[in-house]
Amino acid sequence: MLESSPTVGSVETSDDVKREMASLSLEFNLKDKLFCELFPQLAEEIRAKLSSLSNSSARLRRGAKNGSSSPDATPESWSSALLGNALVIFGVAAFAFTILYVINSVS
């Protein structure tokens, strides 16, 4: 969870998407009455955090309207994904040619 290197089956998301998912999980926890009863102090901390997040997201939206937006994917992540896919395709092709060679040499 602390590193951002791609792994098999992982999904790459931007930091903004991760923050949005984290805030959604906070909202989900606050909707659970049992959670709020068991952890009243934590529920108050979450409420305070959500209010500060909503204030900062409003500021970000105002900044985006003024033309200061950031791209979702970096060129480095795009090129590394392309390189990884090319290596997988090359490996499958090499394996297929090896199988064909073995079949032809046996018969």
Image (cartoon, rainbow, N blue to C red):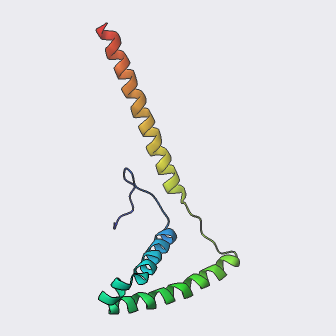
Residue 78 in the image: x percent, y percent? 52, 52
Instruction: Locate the N terminus and report the quarter of the image it occupies.
Output: bottom left
Left or right: where 64 falls relative to 91: right
Find the residue positioned furthest to the right. 66
Which residue is more in the foreground, 12 or 82? 12
Which residue is more in the foreground, 9 or 42? 42
Left or right: where 35 falls relative to 20: left
Residue 81 in the image: x percent, y percent? 47, 49
Find the residue positioned furthest to the front. 33
Left or right: where 55 falls relative to 48: right
Task: Name the residue located 66 percent from the left edge and 82 percent from the top edge.
Answer: 62
Residue 106 in the image: x percent, y percent? 29, 9
Instruction: Locate the C terminus and report the quarter of the image it occupies.
Output: top left
Residue 52 position (above or below residue 80): below
Task: Name the residue located 65 percent from the left edge and 76 percent from the top edge.
Answer: 64
Residue 65 in the image: x percent, y percent? 70, 77
Task: Name the residue located 40 percent from the left edge and 80 percent from the top edge.
Answer: 29
Residue 88 position (above or below residue 10): above
Instruction: Report which quarter residue 94 is drawn in.
Output: top left
Task: Name the residue located 59 percent from the left edge and 65 percent from the top edge.
Answer: 71
Find the residue positioned furthest to the top. 107
Number of marks in the rendered image: 0
